Structure formats: structure tokens, C-alpha cells
Image (cartoon, grey):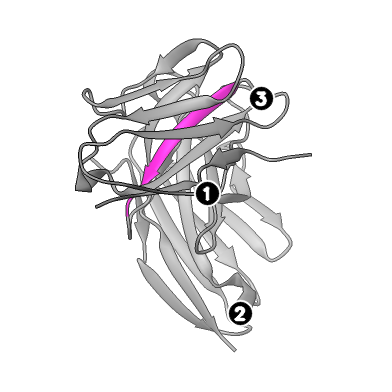
Amino acid sequence: QQQVKQSPQSLIVQKGGISIINCAYENTAFDYFPWYQQFPGKGPALLIAIRPDVSEKKEGRFTISFNKSAKQFSLHIMDSQPGDSATYFCAASGMMGSTLGRLYFGRGTQLTVWP
Amino acid sequence: NAGVMQNPRHLVRRRGQEARLRCSPMKGHSHVYWYRQLPEEGLKFMVYLQKENIIDESGMPKERFSAEFPKEGPSILRIQQVVRGDSAAYFCASSQSSTGELFFGEGSRLTVL
């Protein structure tokens, strides 16, 4: 079963707008939540990550919001640019048992930013 | 400072042949992971290895697939008697520890004719 559920599947945003991608998880053993960016023909690259001891983390135009009680986290891209057009994956991993050392990925969101 | 190196980048095999995918982790990284990505899908975990040890192979099909990470040399993902359903992008990632950041290679794209 899909351990991390991601939505929307695709997203079209005007240049300068805000892109929002949401993820939800069930396994309470997860304690590390990264976001990856992938361009066509390339491997995923870590964009930003958060641990559950904080509710928000910001790096430049990228912000992760984390709601531990709801088991949800989201990526916000402020002032979206055409160069941000890529596929974004949320993921989760933990420190115990089957969650240790492996990432569970969402199915991805294809973001297109129109100029 | 080379990243995770994977080769070949593209591989074409006919049904029934063998495919060997190689991965050299980043310098100083002893943890290697293999993931498979099908079109329009996220990455699915296959196997987690440390030098000479398979730590977790729960995501790998029981038959035809095997992985190793020898003391010397790259990690190898081996697929025997390939079938069309094996066509996918296979990504290798490495980290310094089991809880460290994963760095991905650019992938090996396998096409089975």
C-alpha cells in the first residue's frame, strides 16, 4: 500500500504564484520528511527536509509546513518561476525497523510554471 | 567531488537476457540503496546494502533480482532473464549513515524489447 500519499498529481501555476503540494502519511514511526525535485532524465535531488520537532522550515522560496497531529506535510514554493517546472516528490523515513534507512516516496507532482 | 555514479545510463536488452547495473557511491559513503521508478510513479525501494552486507532486501522481487556491494568496487544490481515489465529507471542512492541524507545518481534506464 502507498505509505505516503501525495496530491495533486499535476499542478499549473502562473509565474510569481504560490505552488502548494500536499502529502499525508500513516506510519507514526516516520520522523524524517524530505522533498525531492526531479528534472526529466535526471535523478531526484534533495530540496528541503524537516523533522517532526518543528512545524515549519524555510529555505529561500521553499517552505515545508508540518502538522504532526494530522500526519500531513506540505511544500510551498513562493514566487514560482519557470525554472521550478519539475516533478516533486515527498518522502518519509524513520529510525526503526522497516523504516530505517529507506525512503517511502509519494507518487509525485508534476509542476508547470507558465511565464 | 564526484556524486553517485551509475552506469550504464541506458541499457537495452531482449527478453531472457541479463541486465547488470552498476553504482559507485559518493566518496566516504558506505550505505547504498537501489530504487526503481516506473513511468508516472514515484520511486520504489528495492534494496539497502552496506559493504559486503545486504541490510534490507524486502522491496526486491524474490526471483531474478539480486544485489551486491562488495568490499572493493561498485554495487551491482543484477536482473536475470529480463521481461518487459522490468523496463524502468533504476536509481542508486548513497549516504554516510542509515539516517543520513540520500544522494541519488542520474539513473540507469533499462528497456526490454
Select label 3 or label 1 by which is in front: 3
Please tell me whether residue B70 is drawn above or below residue A88 in the rendered image.
above
Dot 1 lies on which element? strand
Left or right, A32 with reference to A63: left
Tell me residue A72's x, y (percent). Answer: 42, 49
Which residue appears at 55% of the width and 72% of the height? Answer: A85
Task: Tell me which residue sits at (46%, 54%) in the image.
Answer: A89
Q: Chain of mark 3?
A: B
Mark on residue A82?
2
Any mark on residue A66, and which?
1
Q: Was residue B96 drawn as part of the magenta stretch in this picture? A: no
In the displayed structure image, the side of residue B38 where residue A73 appears, left or right:
right
Q: Nearer the viewer, residue A41 or A7?
A: A41
Q: In the image, what residue type sits under mark 3? A: His
x then y, percent, for residue B45: 38, 35
Residue A114, quarter of picture: bottom right
Instruction: Mark 3 and mark 2 in contact? Answer it, CB < 8 Å.
Output: no
Mark 3 or 2, closer to the camera: 3
Where does the image place residue A41, in percent across and percent down from the top left? 50, 60
Question: Which stretch appears magenta?
Answer: B31-38
The crowding category of the residue bearing disc 2, from other C-alpha atoms within 10 Å (few below 14, some 14 to 19, many at least 20), is some
Q: Amino acid at mark 1?
A: Phe
At label 2, the amino acid type is: Pro
| Mark 1 and mark 2 on one chain | yes
Give me the C-alpha separation between circle 3 and circle 1: 29 Å
Q: Is residue B57 left or right of residue A77?
A: left
SS of the residue at dot 2?
A: helix
